[in-house]
Image (cartoon, rainbow, N blue to C red):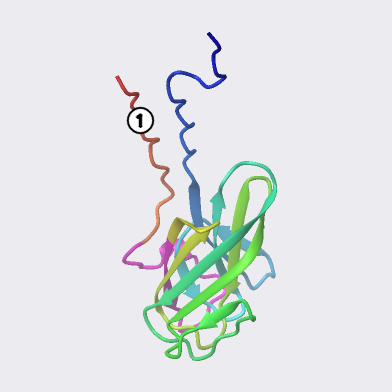
Amino acid sequence: MAQSGAPATPVEKPATKPVRSIPYVSITGEDGKQRHYETNAIPLLFHRACFGWRMYLGGPNRVVSLKEVLTTSQPAEQVIAGPETEVSADKTRATTRMFETVQDGVLQRSWCIIPGDPPGTYTYDVSIDGEPRGEFVFCAIEVPDQNPNTDPRELSCPNKFNAVERAQPQIRKAS
């Protein structure tokens, strides 16, 4: 009797590797040096503070389809966006659709603070190749004196990020 090449029992798909997602802030000090922090507390330092997210996806270098939806708790005074971004009429939501390159297993995006960026919560919902892959919640905090030596780790933020990795879920095998 001939046998097919298919196994008699279904083969389990390998578990998806956990994604380590990190919000970050970089600030250019008075000395011109850039300082980098793993935090979601953004000091609103115009033309000095930048912020972004980084996802460790693994795998080969490749191009992916990225959809990123930014929602802010208050409207921006001005929005600088390219043709790949649609901005809501009330300037509290911007949807960007573009192709991005995963390099050495990492995908990342960043933006810099400009005058008119509002204080409050900035939420980024990120989808890759049509699948939701992450949410990043930032706090944008006013710095009245625009001190370029502000340390974001010292700012008060209601949803402050602490760099903690989650434990990997245990995979149960069918019995």
Task: Give the residues in magenta.
Answer: 136-159
Residue 4 at what x, y percent from top left? 55, 18
| Residue that appears at 36% across and 35% down | 169
Q: Is residue 160 visible?
A: yes
Q: Amino acid at mark 1?
A: Gln
In the image, residue 1 above or below residue 84: above
| Residue that appears at 54% across and 14% down | 3
In the image, residue 73 above or below residue 153: below
Residue 1 at what x, y percent from top left? 53, 8
| Residue that appears at 54% across and 78% down | 45
The picture quadrant where one finds residue 159 is bottom left
Residue 7 at what x, y percent from top left? 50, 19
**For residue 66, side relative to residue 140 (left or right):** right
Furthest residue to the front? Answer: 1
**For residue 79, side relative to residue 73 (left or right):** right
Query: For numbered disc 1, what is the local secondary structure?
Result: loop
User: Magenta stretch containing residue 143, yes or no?
Assistant: yes
Q: Is residue 27 visible?
A: no
165 and 145: which is toward the camera: 165
Q: Which residue is mark 1?
A: 170
| Residue that appears at 45% across and 18% down | 8
